[in-house]
Amino acid sequence: MSESDVAIRILDGEIDKAVSVLQRISSKLAAFEHEHLAREEATQEQAMIVAHYLSNYFTCCETVFLRVSRHFENNLPGECWHQALLEKMALDIPGIRPALIDDALRADLLELLKFRHFTRYYFELDYDWEKLRFLLGKFHEIRSRLPSSLQQFQVYLRQIC
């Protein structure tokens, strides 16, 4: 087995692990929504929990994308690399790799990226529930589509090694 095949199998395993983490985060957030947000007036403490789950979900996605980018040597700029990474993951690069996500998924993930950036530098505790509900809608769209995108990419990986 070549070094390249080993690296691809490692990447495949990393994607498997990330899918498992994404599923756990997704399940916990969905359960939290069902238990707390559907029946009572949402509190700021609950907003902080939702913000935490959304940020962690995006960070896990971004980690997978970064590993794919590094494996296929998709150079990223020093500044604004987070957004550039999402753009690269939506690119089909003939002879190198297929797109990992489509443009609609990229746009939804971009909303979570912006929110994560906001939460890292926002030190107040007064979250906007209208915005959080908008982001939860994006999250549900992402969680329904991202697993199949990752699985399709893994099929590609298994074909090339």
Image (spheres, rainbow, N blue to C red):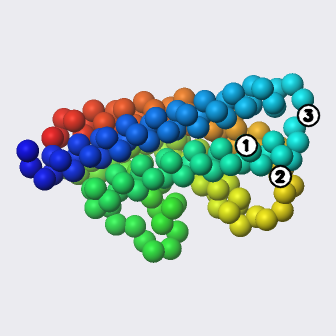
Instruction: Identify which residue is drawn at 59% across, 48% down.
Output: 56
The image position of residue 30, as x and y in percent, is 67, 30
| Residue under label 1 | 50
Q: CA distance from mark 3 to mark 1?
A: 14 Å
Q: Residues within 10 Å of mark 1 (few under 14, many from 20)?
A: many
Label of residue 41 in the image: 3
Instruction: Identify which residue is drawn at 64% across, 39% down.
Output: 138
Residue toward you, 123 or 149 = 123
Q: Quadrant of residue 85?
A: bottom left
- Amino acid type of disc 3? Glu
Q: Quadrant of residue 152?
A: top left
Residue toward you, 85 or 43 = 43
Q: CA distance from mark 1 to mark 2?
A: 10 Å
Q: Residues within 10 Å of mark 2 (few under 14, many from 20)?
A: some
* Residue 20 appears in view: yes
Classify 13 as above or below 119: above
- Amino acid type of disc 1? Val
Q: Are marks 1 and 2 in contact (CB under 8 Å)?
A: yes
Q: Is residue 122 left or right of residue 20?
A: right
Q: CA distance from mark 3 to mark 2?
A: 14 Å
Q: Are marks 3 and 1 in contact (CB under 8 Å)?
A: no
